[in-house]
Amino acid sequence: MMFFLRNRRVSTHQKSVIPSGTWRIFAEGGAEGSATAFRLSAALSFTLIFLAPLAAPAQAHFDGARAYEYAREFVGIGPRWPTSPGHAKAEAFLRDHFQRDHDQLEEDTFTADTPIGSVPMCNLIVRFPGTKPGIIVLGTHYETNYPLRNINFVGANDGGSTTGLLLGVADRLRDEAGHAPGKKLQGYSVWLVFFDGEEAIQSWSRSDSTYGSRHLAAKWGRDGTLNQIKAFLLADMIGDKDLDIQRESNSTGWLVSLVSDAAKKLGYQRYFFQQSMAVEDDHLPFVERGVPSIDIIDLDYGPNNSYHHTAQDTMDKISAHSLTIDGDVFMETIRLIDQR
Ligand SMILES: [Zn+2]
């Protein structure tokens, strides 16, 4: 991602660590209340111990460590700007990964008309069919920035972290669908898209940027796919150790609320939407065609954003913990969209 406008809203970074209101009720009850609360909680624990084997297992956290490991392997390819050998390796990495797992992979190859002439590009689309008609699309870009080709820019956060995140989401979806051939997700189909050509080739403009998403949104507009998309969730630069995801103001209101609800439900609200800004990114071609879309992005990367688009964007700046938060919120958002 490149271009953004800051709308300075209230900048309150609450770093509250109280996980939930449960214990406050006990704490505020006074001595007598506490004794009652203790008896109640002991009785409750007793009941829960015996009911536990009958209850459905709690949903485990998203495996952010595994997503981080995917990102580390992927970023290890090195710079992957369009036309570079690293780009071909990045495509092959994703192709091999999904072929190995026998997923429904489509390679959407096209030629982009850029300031340096015609550039071959490739979006990768992985489909997980669901029982319900309709599609939820999760996207990221995977390539690195062409203008930064001489500074060993590896885009650990910018392109790498969210590629790892979606590889982790794919693992989770395979588990949920149940692995056997022909098995489906309970709910809408989920498609993962790895976009090429998000970054500008020369300098950011609407015609020199988001090549992959503009191509795919136009194609899906022509063949009717867009009408089936219930929501498009874009992930960009959210591997940052110091996670503070902004409320992106071109995004669709109800979808922003839903992601906010998911974050609150999981106790992650302090990482989400404390500031607001408008960002131009791969969601815009979908927003413009009326697809409910959100850009889930953290554009505050390093002191004064100094890691963004610099050789400083390396794996030590991102964390498995942030990817766990992202993955949990994406999976919960999918559930909330299914229930809508
Ligand atoms: Zn970028």
Image (cartoon, helix red, strand yellow):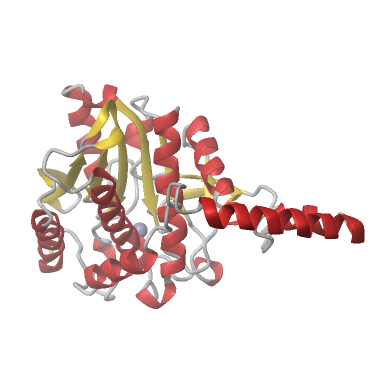
The reply, left or right, for residue 51 in relation to residue 69 is: right
Which image quadrant: the C terminus?
top left
Whether 245 is drawn above or below 147: the answer is: above
Extreme residue toward the right, this view? 31
| Residue 275 vs residue 228, the one in the foreground | 228
Question: Which quadrant holds residue 224?
Answer: top left
Q: Position of residue 25 (x, y in %)?
A: 79, 52
At horizontal 91% and vertical 57% (from top left) the residue drawn is 32
Q: Position of residue 115 (x, y in %)?
A: 20, 50
The reply, left or right, for residue 105 in relation to residue 21 is: left
Whether 265 is drawn above or below 46: the answer is: above
The reply, left or right, for residue 147 in relation to residue 9 is: left
Can residue 202 be seen here? The reply is yes
Can residue 12 be seen here? The reply is no
Question: Which quadrant holds residue 86?
Answer: bottom left
At horizontal 26% and vertical 51% (from top left) the residue drawn is 175
| Residue 4 vs residue 293, the one in the foreground | 293
The reply, left or right, for residue 279 in relation to residue 84 is: right
- Ligand 1 quadrant in view: bottom left
At horizontal 22% and vertical 44% (from top left) the residue drawn is 212
Question: Which quadrant holds residue 163?
Answer: bottom left
Q: Position of residue 117 (x, y in %)?
A: 12, 50
At horizontal 51% and vertical 37% (from top left) the residue drawn is 258
Whether 224 is drawn above or below 240: the answer is: above
Number of numbered discs: 0
Whether 256 is drawn above or below 307: the answer is: above
Q: Position of residue 239 (x, y in %)?
A: 41, 63
| Residue 29 vs residue 196, the one in the foreground | 29
| Residue 36 vs residue 335, the one in the foreground | 36
